[in-house]
Every structure is written in structure tokens, then in C-alpha cells.
Amino acid sequence: MNILVCIKQVPGTTKVEVDEATGVLKRDGIEAKMNPYDLYAVETALKIKEEVGGEVKVMTMGPPQAEAIIRECFMMGADDGILLSDRKFAGADVLATSYTLAQGVKKAGDFDLIICGKQTTDGDTAQVGAEMAEVLDIAHVANVRKILEINKGNIIVEMDMPTTVEIAEIQLPCLITVEKGIFQPRLPSFKKKLATKNKEVFVYGLKDFGDQNEKRYGLNGSPTQVEKIFPPDTNRDQEIWKGTGEDLALQICEKLKALKFV
């Protein structure tokens, strides 16, 4: 089975700046890491590979430094990695991101299964996976918490919906987004790090895609208009109260009333 996992490099800190002109995060020079939700997608792919055989590829869109998370996946057991990197991809919203990733999938080859994490910690939209599938015209389901069965042409999954648990059988090829608790991600292997330190990461830009219309990518292809984006204010004010349990309970009650919480 040929499996592709879409991953993303996200800021490793909440202390990030925003470009006032474009409304996008300034990612240069800040600490970065793999999106935590994507670790569960990678682990799911590796588990399926161990069960039915095949190959696991990972793909990300980002600047050249995003190669680091691809190499992290090599250390977990991924077979190949693809980086979609082009300045024309910068500033993409979920629509442009989904379209770019879909073009990367078409360039990379045929896949039986595409797996994405539930969402990213920097955008939290949880839309990219479904939009990718729509562009690729393949079936997709979200909120997958368990893989029940995989056979030659179908996959049966259990989905954690808001008020119910549902079971779906999807024809391959398809795309799924997985929940955080589906598997416990394995730790990267130092042995695999040494074995893959010179492994090639394939890099694709706009010139490599079948559709090279610049109006479909990056800021040009992003209909979402961000009016304002800013990091949350931090409040480190502290008050230390002393007294009996009864006195402290009364103080807490009065404080909640003063803050209009009750």
C-alpha cells in the first residue's frame, strides 16, 4: 500500500510576530517543530505499513528549513520525503494550501491512502485535509480514531463525531484525518538518523506542477481576507491571600463577583 502523510512545520513558541501588511505569521528566525497532531498521522501510516506492507512518504509545504521535519519522519521510519517550497507559495490560506498540496500529490505519484493530522496548532482550521480531497476528487472522512480493517480496495474506520461514534467503509484511494488518540507516536530512532542523514528529500516548486497558474497559489490564490491577527495578551498579575478556609472562600467569591464571572 502506498501511503502519503501530509505534515507541517509550526512555530514552537507563542511569541511570534505578525506581518501587518499581509496578516501572516513571520516564521523566519523563530523556533519551529512538527505540528503535534501530524505525529499521530505519521504513526498511523507506519502501523498500517507494518500490518499490510507498502511504503510511507511524507510531504510538507514550507520554506527550505521545513526539511527538518521530513528528516524527523525518516527517523521514525518514513521511506521518502517531499518538500513543496517556492516563494510563490508563501502566505497561502487554507484554500491555496490545499490546492498546492493537491498539486504536490499529483506530481508525487499515485497513493492508496493519504493521512493528515486533525488540524495544526498555528491555524486550527481543520479544513486542509478535506479541501485537498475535494481537489483530488477522492473520498475522505475526518475525526478517525481507530482503523478497524484494511483490505485490497477499502478501509473501515471508526470516527469520533460530536455526539456519536460512527463506522465508515471508504473505497481506496481516499484521505483520512486522524484524532490525537489513535496511536501513541514512536520516538525518533538515532540509528535511523544515522542511516538516513544523506537521504535525498525531493523538492518541488511551481515549475514542477501541471498547473502553473500563479493565481492559484500563495497570497494570490487566497480569498480569505484577514482583518486582524495578533498574539494573545499575557497577564502575569498575582495576588496572594492568607486566612482560614472560610475567609479565603469568601474572598474568592467576592473576587469572582468583581470580575463579573458570577
Image: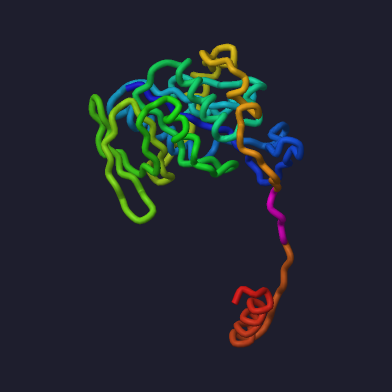
- In the rendering, at what x and y percent does residue 166 appear? 29, 47
Vertical placement of residue 107 versus 128, above or below: above
Magenta residues span: 231-235
Magenta stretch: dominant secondary structure: loop
Question: Is residue 101 covered in magenta?
Answer: no
- In the rendering, at what x and y percent does residue 28 appear? 71, 31
Question: Is residue 233 covered in magenta?
Answer: yes
**Colour scheme:** rainbow
Give the residue drawn at x 68%, y 81%: 242
Give the residue drawn at x 65%, y 39%: 225
- Hey, which quadrant is residue 256 in on the image? bottom right
Q: Nearer the viewer, residue 243 or 143?
A: 143
Which quadrant, please, contains the N terminus? top left
Q: Nearer the viewer, residue 54 or 122?
A: 122
- In the rendering, at what x and y percent does residue 141 appear? 37, 38
Q: Is residue 13 left or right of residue 34?
A: right
- Hey, which quadrant is residue 170 in on the image? top left
Give the residue drawn at x 57%, y 15%: 212
